[in-house]
Amino acid sequence: MTSSVLPGSTLSTSTLSTSRSTGPVGPVGRAGRAGQATEATRPAGQAALAVALAVRTDLWSHLVEYREESRWTHLLPTADLAPALDPSLHAELAESQVWLLSWLPGQGTPLHDHGASSGAFAVARGALTERVVAGREGRPPHQSTADLAAGRVRFFGPHYVHQVVNTLHQPAVSVHVYSPRLTLMNTYRVGSAGLVRVSTERAGVDW
Ligand SMILES: [Fe+2]
């Protein structure tokens, strides 16, 4: 295990842009749950929270490590974050799980979903490339790829399937928000008839 801390970067909220993404099951938030925010507002709130945390490098810059062998992940205690955030984000924070990730060049995820969780991630340093695969069983999948520079945020509903990779030559850092908290992830491959589930991973430290 190797680790190092790089200087923090500063983002202006004026540079941040959001992208709403749809997963293989349709519109964001389709699997809404009783007692939670509406389907239309929940992912947007998570995106706002991810952005707010990404720009506050003072909250997490000293924690960042980089690992040669794999992506580095760190669960940020939400109770520690609340005092630094606008009160309008406190309700969202209370229902969310917040992860800080670092990505060395070439590091990335397999194609995966987030179980029943919806979420958002904001690129805080460097850049990441996101590949999204959407498609219903038995139908040809639709794939798209986007390069996400620092300041970009993506948000999505349950069962959204994507792959995120650092394809550039500089380390990257991102902030991820999920609600409800991640308990499992399914990994996939793209077959001739659509997405094929490869495995199911329970909550762990390497994602
Ligand atoms: Fe993901």
Image (cartoon, rainbow, N blue to C red):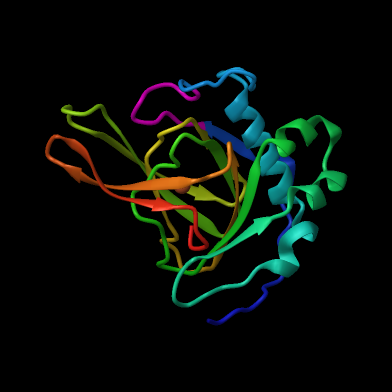
For this rendering, which residue is in front, 12 or 46?
46
Q: Residue at x 50, y 46 (%)?
A: 183
Q: Is residue 194 visible?
A: yes
The secondary structure making up most of the magenta span is loop
Q: Position of residue 166 (x, y in %)?
A: 45, 60
Reply above or below: 22 against 148: above
Q: Position of residue 109 (x, y in %)?
A: 40, 57
Q: Position of residue 56 (x, y in %)?
A: 77, 52
Q: Position of residue 88 (x, y in %)?
A: 81, 30
Specify the quadrant of the image occupied by residue 38: top right
Reply above or below: 84 against 63: above
For this rendering, which residue is in front, 68 or 203?
203
For this rendering, which residue is in front, 22 or 158?
158
Q: Residue at x 46, y 20 (%)?
A: 30
Q: Is residue 147 visible?
A: no
Q: Residue at x 66, y 40 (%)?
A: 96
Reply above or below: 187 against 161: below
Specify the quadrant of the image occupied by residue 18: top right
Reply above or below: 71 against 32: below
Q: Is residue 26 left or right of residue 181?
A: left
Assess whether residue 118 is covered by the magenta stretch. Answer: no
Residue placed furthest toward the bottom: 2
Residue placed furthest toward the left: 192
What residue span does the magenta drawing correspond to? 20-29
